[in-house]
């Protein structure tokens, strides 16, 4: 979920055991950081015009600094080319009179922070009732993209007035790099701010627990050694409490986590509100900034996730054996054996004798028209935050495992069970995949299913970068459809069948079937996330394998570790687990 940035950090602090000797602090939303990234959507391309921008601080943020003065404003610029003049101001309304102002001599504007003294300091007497706007204006003599902002949606953090337009609230797009500088002898002593609270995207009723993570900032000059929090779920009467032992000196920013067991029975949207209610050291001077909320979706149950690992590789690639070893060694670990399915596309660095047509078609995931490379990996065809492609090159095995772990932490809302039967007379494999969904909209687009016939233990002809003999694993031999087939649902259930013709050079004992259900967007390679996968090996053909049914459909108990991973078919070590929604100790 989104994290809103907090306001106010120290300008100068010399910390002691209990208090900090502080000359001043800044108030704003950018945490003392300035962006030099250009965001054209916030800028004007006209010449000889003024651009204005501002933030709004609520009265509580202003009045907590009573007895001090607002003496200066720091205004950020992503670049200064073409900008010759800048001024700053403080107002009660965006179009109101300046309560205080200041400017920079022509030609003195710099890229990054411009610290501008106010002509007359603005006293803060604690009587402000409507909050304050802190802003700046700059004159651009030529075409320029100079406004400094972060693309972090934050309430009240970006008001913009472009040439010829009116003031508009763009806070849902980002936050402005501007802040007021407060100095004086009466800076607040005890003032924690709960910057944000994060929940998982989903609360699973059957699991029965939820971890809440808060982000807290000490804006007071006195060190805080701990605090109490309360959590409330909208629509319920329960109050969940926790004491957080955490030492925060002036300007420290830390996270904390605590667990609750919500009494929620109905699916839909949920909202949790967390409040810091008490500090070890006394009363918080500004309780208005001690509250934060987050929303989440409530789902009755989920399924064990199997991550689909897709490797781009060829015999002409000298670096590919390195990543192949990462995949092999990872799959040998007990924690990944039953929750990762791997397959290889022989493409991206030329092709080889194992390449099938689909391998080349999947180069689309590198971004159409862009460069391709191998070795390369996709984990559930998932694109990391800020990325432009689901393809990446793991620099180490731990890098690969980290990507897999992030996927394993994501709930799966569709199940897959695979049956495969050999027809030796027709030299075919008949595959049946069935399952259920626990959430109608687990995909944005109509969910599709792809089934792969995979072969292992294929001796290489001539693998570049390998010493001695090299054996190919997880090689795609056949696919039901390059881009999958749309699932035909019967309520929340489905049943899909396909048949693969075998070639005489396939070694049947080395065959494997992998099935996946994914969200297909033909216009955007970053929106093809795999919802879940399953696999079955030849030894289980004519039988059943894949993801087990839910505990509600079986006498077998549902067991999760404290990280929310389902413990399926594993011997439990002594420790604390969540069994059928209840915490239990296994000895």
Image: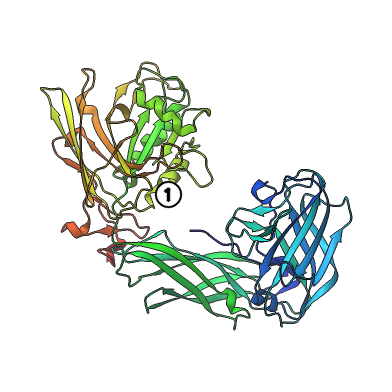
Quarter of the figure with residue 290: bottom right
At mark 1, the secondary structure is: helix
Q: Is residue 39 visible?
A: no
Q: Nearer the viewer, residue 40 or 17?
A: 40
Q: Is residue 321 visible?
A: yes
Quarter of the figure with residue 258: bottom left
User: Residue sitting at 34 percent across and 51 percent down?
Assistant: 442
Q: Nearer the viewer, residue 570 or 238?
A: 238
Report which residue position mark 1 lands on: 406
Q: x%, y% of residue 197?
A: 50, 66
Q: Quadrant of the C terminus?
A: bottom left
Position of residue 116 relative to residue 357, above or below, is below
Q: Nearer the viewer, residue 160 or 365?
A: 160
Q: x%, y% of residue 319?
A: 48, 26
Left or right of 522, for residue 37: right
Q: Nearer the viewer, residue 377 or 58?
A: 58
User: Residue sitting at 34 percent across and 52 percent down?
Assistant: 441
Position of residue 384 relative to residue 173, above or below, is above
Position of residue 101 relative to residue 19, above or below, is above
Q: Residue furthest left?
A: 425
């Amino acid at each position: 979920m989104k994290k809103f940035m907090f306001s106010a950090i120290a300008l100068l602090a010399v910390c002691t055991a209990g208090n900090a000797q502080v000359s001043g602090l800044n108030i704003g939303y950018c945490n003392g950081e300035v962006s030099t990234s250009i965001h054209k959507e916030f800028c004007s391309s006209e010449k000889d015009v003024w651009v204005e921008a501002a933030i709004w601080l609520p009265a509580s943020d202003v009045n907590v600094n009573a007895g001090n003065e607002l003496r200066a404003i720091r205004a950020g610029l992503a670049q200064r080319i073409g900008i010759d003049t800048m001024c700053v101001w403080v107002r009660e309304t965006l179009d109101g009179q300046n309560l205080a102002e200041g400017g920079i001599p022509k030609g003195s504007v710099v890229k990054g922070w411009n610290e501008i003294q106010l002509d007359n300091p603005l006293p803060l007497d604690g009587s402000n009732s409507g909050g304050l706007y802190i802003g700046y204006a700059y004159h651009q003599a030529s075409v320029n993209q100079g406004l400094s902002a972060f693309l972090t949606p934050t309430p009240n953090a970006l008001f913009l007035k472009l040439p010829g337009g009116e003031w508009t609230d763009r806070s849902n797009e980002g936050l402005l790099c501007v802040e007021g500088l407060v100095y004086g002898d009466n800076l607040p002593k005890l003032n924690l701010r709960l910057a944000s609270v994060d929940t998982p995207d989903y609360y699973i009723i059957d699991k029965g627990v939820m971890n809440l993570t808060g982000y807290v900032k000490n804006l007071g000059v006195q060190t805080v050694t701990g605090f109490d929090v309360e959590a409330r779920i909208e629509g319920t009467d329960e109050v969940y409490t926790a004491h957080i032992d955490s030492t925060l000196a002036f300007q420290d920013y830390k996270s904390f986590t605590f667990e609750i067991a919500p009494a929620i029975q109905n699916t839909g949207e949920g909202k949790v509100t967390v409040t810091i209610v008490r500090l070890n050291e006394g009363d918080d001077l500004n309780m208005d900034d001690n509250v934060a909320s987050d929303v989440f979706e409530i789902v009755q149950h989920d399924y064990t996730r199997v991550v689909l690992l897709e490797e781009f590789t060829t015999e002409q690639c000298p670096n590919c054996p390195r990543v192949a070893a990462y995949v092999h060694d990872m799959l040998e670990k007990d924690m990944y054996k039953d929750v990762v399915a791997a397959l290889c596309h022989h493409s991206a660095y030329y092709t080889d004798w194992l390449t099938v047509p689909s391998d080349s078609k999947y180069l689309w995931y590198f971004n159409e028209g862009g460069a391709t490379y191998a070795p390369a990996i996709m984990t559930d065809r998932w694109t990391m935050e800020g990325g432009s492609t689901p393809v990446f090159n793991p620099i180490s095995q731990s890098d690969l495992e980290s990507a897999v772990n992030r996927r394993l932490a994501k709930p799966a809302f569709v199940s897959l069970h695979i049956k495969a039967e050999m027809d030796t007379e027709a030299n075919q494999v008949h595959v049946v995949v069935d399952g259920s969904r626990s959430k109608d909209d687990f995909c944005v687009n109509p969910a599709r299913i792809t089934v792969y016939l995979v072969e292992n233990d294929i001796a290489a002809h001539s693998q570049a970068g390998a010493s001695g003999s090299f054996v190919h694993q997880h090689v795609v031999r056949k696919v039901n459809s390059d881009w999958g087939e749309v699932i035909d649902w019967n309520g929340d259930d489905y049943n899909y069948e396909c048949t693969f013709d075998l070639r005489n050079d396939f070694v049947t004992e080395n065959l494997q079937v992998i099935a996946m259900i994914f969200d297909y967007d033909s216009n955007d390679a970053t929106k093809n996330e795999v919802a879940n996968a399953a696999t079955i090996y030849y030894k289980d053909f004519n039988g059943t394998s894949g993801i087990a049914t839910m505990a509600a459909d079986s006498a077998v108990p549902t067991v999760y570790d404290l990280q929310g991973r389902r413990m399926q078919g594993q011997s439990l070590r002594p420790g604390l687990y969540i069994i059928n929604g209840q915490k239990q100790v296994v000895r």
